[in-house]
Every structure is written in C-alpha cells, then in structure tokens.
C-alpha cells in the first residue's frame, strides 16, 4: 500500500488535504477516490505509528483524504545512532542520507570538514538542508519507518562540540565513536557494546584532518575501526550503521 509522510495533525475520522509533495505523489501514482493509502506523521517525539486513509477527492493540484484507524507500529532501530558525517561531493551525500534513513539512523548532522569538497553557505546551505530532509522523508516512505530522522544544519566540528552542553560520560550522555585510521583503534563491535544512544563521527573524502581527530578525541570520542579495508566516505558510515542498528 502506498505510504505518505503527512506532518499535519492526524486523527481518525478527520478529513485533510495532503501536503503538496504527497499530493503530487498520489497524482503520479494515478490513485482514485476510494483507494487506500497509509499516512504517517514522522515526528521523532510524537505518538508515532501510522494511519489508514482513503482518498476522497482528486483535484488538479490537491488531494483530500479521510484518515482512518491508527496503528501503533514502530520500525525503529533498537539503538539510537546519531550520525555526524563529513559532507561528501555531489550525489554521494544524497545517497548517504537516503541509506542512513533506511538503516534507522536517529539523526544526521552534515559536517563541514577541512577536506570536504562541497562547501555550503547561506541560501545554498538552506536549500541543501531542505533537499536532504526531503531525501530522508522519501526513504522513510519507502522503507516503512514512521519516524523521520532529523537532518540538522551543517556545522564544523568545533561548533558541534561547543554546542553539546552534556559532557560525554555524564548520565544519559550518548557514547561517542570516531572512525579512524590511527594506530590504537579498536573494532567497532567491541567499542560499541551496550544499547544506549551513540554518536558516530565519520569524515569526508580524504578523512578528517589530524587536528579534527585530535579535537574529537579531546571531547570524548573513542577511535574505532571497521576492519582492514579502507571504505569510501559514503560507504563507511553506512557499514557502521548496519552493524549498530539492524536487529
């Protein structure tokens, strides 16, 4: 059954107009009045679940539906992993966001690293952020997730660590792991033992600089490895997410 993200208020029995993106998708699929669809709100902190819905009217640019029963279905990963990922070039970042959402990432923060090929500022940064959030929404519609991971605004590592009020190691703080090629790393599955929230830091093409790695280590990140092979910048965080989030 087609699934659509609908961030407006959903309640059984309500009649609503779908948001423009979802309405266009319904029209592309050539659905008709009476056809059944599934809606989900997508909030990370709301009631979750999904709703049955029925198409009532197809307009030129609008679609009206009636919301049906709510189903408390959760398809979230057993562990909340927050990805701090170096921005990769061109479509690679789109691919990373899409697959990370499918794998169950809790949130994504694009990292403006020293070696990032793509540099974002001002209006261009805002457009990219909106685009990446839309990519995450589409991935959730496809894979069955009812909670959409938030794609935060792009930051550099210094700004990120300054913004974290809760120091690592304090009660409730997320574990912090850094993908590194340095000597002395430990395997991911060893370092990530446990089930609490986790922040995973991975660099762009060329990796993080020595200064960035030093800064991460100073702020509680433990260096880990995924094995003997050196994976591409868009592959490595996904391999880690698969190991951490797939039940």
Image (cartoon, rainbow, N blue to C red):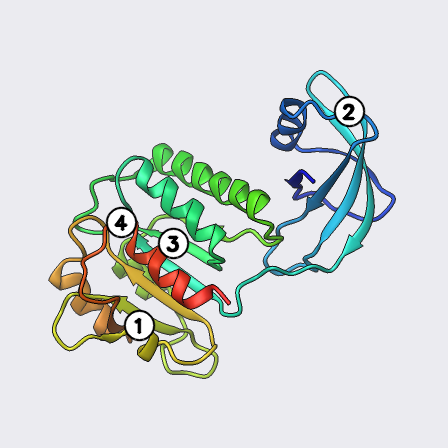
Residue 12 at x, y percent in the picture = 84, 48
Q: Nearer the viewer, residue 55 or 111?
A: 55
Tell me the number on the disc at residue 109. Answer: 3
Confirm or deny contact between disc 3 and disc 1 (CB under 8 A). no
Marks 3/1: CA–CA distance: 20 Å
| Residue tagged 1 | 188
Marks 2/4: CA–CA distance: 45 Å
Direction top: furthest residue: 60
Mark 3 / mark 1, whichever is N-terminal = 3
Mark 1 / mark 4, whichever is N-terminal = 4
Q: Nearer the viewer, residue 63 or 237?
A: 237
Tell me the number on the disc at residue 23. Answer: none
Vertical position of residue 114 compared to residue 89: above or below: below
| Residue tagged 4 | 112
Q: Residues within 10 Å of mark 1 (few under 14, many from 20)?
A: many
Residue 36 at x, y percent in the picture = 78, 37
């Amino acid at each position: 059954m087609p699934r659509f993200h609908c961030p407006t208020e959903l309640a059984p029995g309500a009649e609503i107009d779908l948001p423009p993106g979802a309405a266009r998708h319904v029209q592309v699929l050539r659905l008709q009045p009476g056809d059944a669809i599934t809606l989900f709100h997508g909030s990370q902190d709301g009631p979750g679940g999904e709703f049955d819905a029925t198409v009532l009217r197809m307009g030129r640019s609008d679609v009206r539906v009636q919301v049906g029963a709510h189903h408390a279905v959760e398809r979230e990963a057993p562990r909340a992993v927050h990805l701090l990922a170096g921005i990769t070039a061109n479509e690679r970042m789109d691919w990373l966001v899409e697959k990370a959402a499918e794998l169950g990432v809790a949130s994504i923060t694009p990292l403006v690293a020293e070696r990032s090929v793509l540099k974002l500022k001002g209006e261009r940064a805002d457009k990219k952020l909106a685009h990446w959030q839309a990519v995450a929404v589409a991935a959730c519609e496809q894979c069955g997730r009812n909670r959409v991971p938030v794609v935060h605004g792009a930051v550099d590592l210094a700004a990120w660590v300054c913004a974290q009020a809760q120091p690592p190691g304090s009660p409730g703080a997320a574990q912090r792991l850094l993908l590194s090629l340095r000597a002395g790393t430990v395997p991911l599955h060893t370092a990530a033992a446990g089930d609490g929230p986790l922040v995973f830091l991975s660099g762009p093409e060329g990796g993080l600089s020595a200064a960035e790695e030093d800064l991460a280590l100073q702020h509680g990140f433990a260096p880990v490895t995924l094995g003997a092979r050196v994976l591409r910048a868009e592959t490595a965080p996904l391999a880690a997410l698969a190991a951490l989030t797939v039940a």
